[in-house]
């Protein structure tokens, strides 16, 4: 028996995430401190094991309320199944970031859901098993059970997906002064398009350059070497192709780097973009010039400044 | 003026090295504690700046004694030129490992030469500049100024060559219990052949797998996580092709792993192979079974057991 107070209702926040991180295509991601989604679960101890979505806000009516079609619904249902818990659960989802934006929106909801289950039922489920459940939520939303958003959203900080077969996730350290500027322009890039345009063959030489940069980036995270981190944030495999789907990408990147960002890249499969900076001041300094670039071409958008999250999901109440 | 005692003769040891290290093709290398080459320099303060090779032992008469053709000769000459030193130098080289074996033989001589220069003349040359000189020695021996042997031989431990343009070398930490078993079979593989058979195009999927493993390996070195290190020592780009040039490669690898090695791969471009092990005992345990595999197919060879070197070159006397 747990000594913890048994609650019947709980609200959990899970953060937006940046997947890929330049040279870390398909293997790296990190979590932001904000924005993120909130999922509230209400436990009904009726022994029926029903799951129901009572409300979704902030999605403009775009997300399915059917449990089996909803990333959070799938996660809660699987959690109950895997733990053998027979209570019913009512889910309420507060989306606090745009959908399909390359900010890990579906991952945040899936992770908030599974973390809320764990906070509510206290089954002592290992993180790797929680991750597998969140990945199934991600599969419902994206078609594939990829982990590069759910892993950082759940573990916090930087995560490495070393391998999928078997699943091998490594939590990486985060230098304390690492801040992220996340730029979400009001343009649409379909994940499928972003994947389809990738070349299926790359040169061995480029693969070697990419491994060198990934190795440099991992070393920089451990050694808190911001200069090495900056030199390593280069992607020769994917960015040169995907950036053509994002308006004024080169100009945005140039502007961020000129104003002191350590690196700049596409967040997930875009259209969101991220800059990493040393310190809050340095991060805030690039917001205005980036907004001006967007303004000049008449693209609206939202820019978030956030410390790289160290904690993963947070129980709010 | 330096307070150090000025010597006129000095002997320096520089270690054998393993380049590539499975997933770290063309970017990673590490140094052994033994074997290695010794280079002795005799300073002659005649103001003439002549460089002469007085003797080479242990090479079976295969190495050139012409200064401009010899990796150590080239390094010493360049050191004198770059520092403006006008003394003459006499070089004596004691090779203590096989040539053209994938053990970084030419790199050891070049590094021993430049480190001996620095010990003798005390010009305060930064390591990165010493490295560039040793790379020119390597260019003479191998045709290209690659750094994946000279960097670990000079810096010690594991080194990452993040980039060549510009040259960016990162010294990585080495877990204390990391031992290497180096197997040098008596077969010949020409470096040129080993490079020519590589595919110039690789699949994006394999490039992603390789980056995941490299990231895992770097993380493991920092966190001293031997299990992660073991899982990460996989090479999907180069080993599947190059191993066909090395007799009984699969059998040797299987035997090493079955007997507890953390990982097994081709050293440089072969034919030497390496195993990494946790602790000396674990390393020594695989020597006999590996020898038996070689014996069974009638291949002679030499097997070295060594802690991963933490120090780089050592002044002997």
Image (spheres, coloured by chain):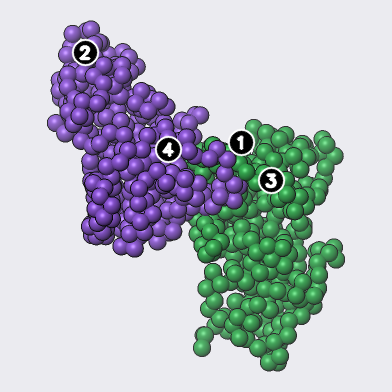
Chain colours: A green, B purple
* Residue B169 in view here: no
Mark 3 falls within which chain? A
Disc 1 to disc 2, C-alpha distance: 49 Å
Disc 3 to disc 2, C-alpha distance: 58 Å
**Tag 1: Cα neighbours inside 10 Å, few (<14), some, or many (≥20)?**
some
Instruction: State which quadrant residue A310 falls in.
Output: bottom right
Instruction: State which quadrant residue B114 falls in.
Output: top left
- Co-location on one chain, circles 1 and 2: no
Mark 4 falls within which chain? B
Q: Which mark is residue B194?
A: 4
Assign a secondary structure to mark 1. loop
Nearest the eye: B98 or B220? B98
- Co-location on one chain, circles 3 and 2: no
Q: Which residue is mark 1?
A: A260
**Disc 3 vs disc 4: which is toward the camera?**
4
Do residues under tags 1 and 2 come within 8 Å of each other at their CB atoms? no
In percent of width and height, residue B172 lies at 39, 44
């Amino acid at each position: 028996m747990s000594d913890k107070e048994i609650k019947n209702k709980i609200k959990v926040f899970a953060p937006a995430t940046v997947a890929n991180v330049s040279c870390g295509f398909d293997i790296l991601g990190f979590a932001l401190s904000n924005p993120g989604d909130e999922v509230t679960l209400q436990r009904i101890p009726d022994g029926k094991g029903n799951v129901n979505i009572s409300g979704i806000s902030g999605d403009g009516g775009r997300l399915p309320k059917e449990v089996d079609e909803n990333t959070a619904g799938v996660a809660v249902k699987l959690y109950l199944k895997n733990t053998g818990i027979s209570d019913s659960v009512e889910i309420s989802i507060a989306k606090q970031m745009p959908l399909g934006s390359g900010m890990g929106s579906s991952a945040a909801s899936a992770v908030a859901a599974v973390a809320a289950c764990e906070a509510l039922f206290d089954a002592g489920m290992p993180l790797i098993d929680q991750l597998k459940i969140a990945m199934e939520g991600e599969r419902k939303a994206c078609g594939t059970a990829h982990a590069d958003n759910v892993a950082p959203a759940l573990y916090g900080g930087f995560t490495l997906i070393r391998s999928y077969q078997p699943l091998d996730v490594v939590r990486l350290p985060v230098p304390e002064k690492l801040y992220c500027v996340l730029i979400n322009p009001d343009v649409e890039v379909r994940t499928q398009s972003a994947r389809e345009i990738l070349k299926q063959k790359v040169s061995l030489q480029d693969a070697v350059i990419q491994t060198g940069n990934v190795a440099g980036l991992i070393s920089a995270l451990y050694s808190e070497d911001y200069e090495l981190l900056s030199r390593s944030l280069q992607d020769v495999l994917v960015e040169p192709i995907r950036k053509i789907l994002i308006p004024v990408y080169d100009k945005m990147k140039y502007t961020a780097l000129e104003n002191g960002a350590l690196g700049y890249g596409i967040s997930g499969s875009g259209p969101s973009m991220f800059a990493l900076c040393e310190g809050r001041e340095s991060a805030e300094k690039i917001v205005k010039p980036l907004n001006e670039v967007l303004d000049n071409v008449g693209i609206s958008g939202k820019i978030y400044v956030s410390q790289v999250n160290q904690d993963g999901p947070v129980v709010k109440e």
